[in-house]
Image (cartoon, grey):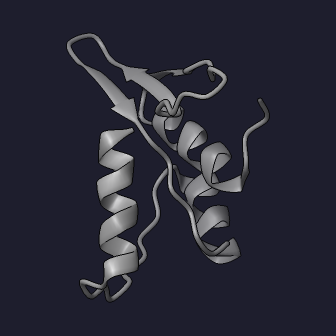
Amino acid sequence: MSENAAEILTHHFFESQGFHVERIPTATGKQRADYCVTDTNHTYVVEVKGRIADEEYAQELLRRGEAFREDALGRINTVSRRIRDAAHQ
């Protein structure tokens, strides 16, 4: 499965920080997280969620290996449901 823009940025970010990143294979009819990210001491399972492309943020992240963006969030059912569903995944 090919990576979307949010997944590509996430993949590059973790690699730029010295992590080893592996795509978790998809399985028909089953939900799985996107990546297994490891360093010498830890393993993380990462589910990537993206909503709006931010070209300036993406360029900064790829150029410097870090970027900052602040978004105001409120607790609404749609956001809460996506977070809950991603956690279950």
The quadrant the C terminus occupies is top left
Give the quadrant of the N terminus.
Answer: top right
Residue at 35%, 66% in the rendered image:
81
Residue at the (50%, 28%) spot, across then down: 35
Q: Classify residue 82 by image quadrant.
A: bottom left
Where 36 sits versus 62, above or below?
above
Q: Is residue 28 left or right of residue 37?
A: right
On the picture, is 51 further left or further right than 69?
right
As drawn, 6 above or below 1: below
Pick whichever, 2 or 87, lies toward us.
87
- Please tell me in which quadrant of the rendered image residue 50 appears: bottom right
Against 45, residue 52 (above or below) is below
Going by the picture, which residue comes out furthest to the left? 41
Q: Quadrant of residue 2?
A: top right
**Which residue is the extreme one toward the top?**
40
Expressed as whole percent of the image width and height from the top left, the position of residue 54 reads 64, 75
Say if 13 sits above or below 35 in the image.
Answer: below
Count numbered badges in the picture: 0
72 relative position to 55: left or right: left
Q: Residue furthest front?
A: 29
| Nearest to the observer: residue 87 or residue 13 | 87
Residue at image point 44% right, 42% down:
47
- Residue 74, given in percent of the width and then of the height, sits at 27, 88
Q: In percent of the image, x 51 and y 33: which residue is there? A: 31
Between 61 and 44, the one nearer to me in the picture: 44
